[in-house]
Amino acid sequence: MRKAQHKDDAAAKLGMWLFLFTEMLLFGGLFLLYGVYLARYPQEFATAGHEMHRWFGAINTIILISSSLLAAMSVTAIRRNDSKTAVLLLVGTVACAAVFLMNKYLEWSAEISRGLYPGSPLLAQAPHGEPLFFSLYYLTVGLHGLHVLIGGSVLSVMAWRIRHGVITAGNCIWLENSTLFWHLVDLIWIFIFPLYYLVL
């Protein structure tokens, strides 16, 4: 006789929240470091911030907010036993992630071509605060981009599992936890956008 699989959704959800807390500590530390240097080099940070492509940042903000909505709707769909809609919504979420990363690639390509990257000859001649700004920018946004890639990959797996009947209305904790992670990715960008693209 096959042994029944133990399932503890509450523990799984708690574990996910604890993991998200460590992620918030990671990015919170970067944001705190940003605040310290902003207080020390306000003019240099403002000058560097004006070099950012704000429309790239605004478009990516809209994309991530939309993707977060699609991810939340996928959970609602699976709870209603509408697996087909849930898969389509997750495909839309992953597509948003791909567009976000493509936009980030285009933006970084443009910035690097202008010499706006850590260690560039252009920034080597700039006041000390400007290289610090771009170092923090590439570190924070690059780390966030990695989370976008991981989150999109995980949601792709969730879509596959829904399509093959592994995730159902009565067994959707993996989908719920995956979308929680995606909402965190979205929330982190909501902080990144004003700090780096709208700095005054």
Image (tube, rainbow, N blue to C red):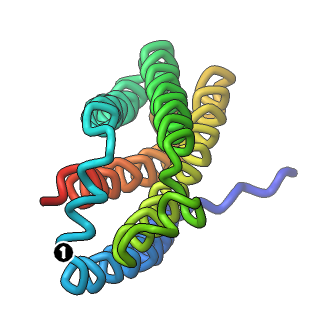
The picture places residue 27, in percent across and down from the top left corner, at: 41, 71
Name the element at disc 1: helix
The answer to whether one can see residue 10 in this image is: no
Quadrant assignment, res 118 = bottom right
Image: 195 above or below 96: below
Residue that sits furthest to the front in the current view = 125
Q: Is residue 71 left or right of residue 7?
A: left
Residue that sits furthest to the right in the current view = 1
Tell me the quarter of the image containing the C terminus: bottom left
The picture places residue 65, in percent across and down from the top left corner, at: 27, 36
Q: How many marks?
A: 1
| Amino acid on which the number 1 mark rests in the picture | Pro
The picture places residue 1, in percent across and down from the top left corner, at: 87, 51
Count neighbours of disc 1 (C-alpha within 10 A) and say few if under 14, some if 14 to 19, many if 20 or more.
some
Residue at 42% x, 21% y: name it: 89
The picture places residue 143, in percent across and down from the top left corner, at: 54, 60
Along the line of sight, the residue nearer the viewer: 78 or 192:
192
Residue at 49% x, 71% y: name it: 19
Residue at 68% x, 23% y: name it: 164
Image: 199 above or below 44: above
The answer to whether one can see residue 50 in this image is: yes
Disc 1: which residue: 42
Residue at 29% x, 29% y: name it: 59
Quadrant assignment, res 20 = bottom left
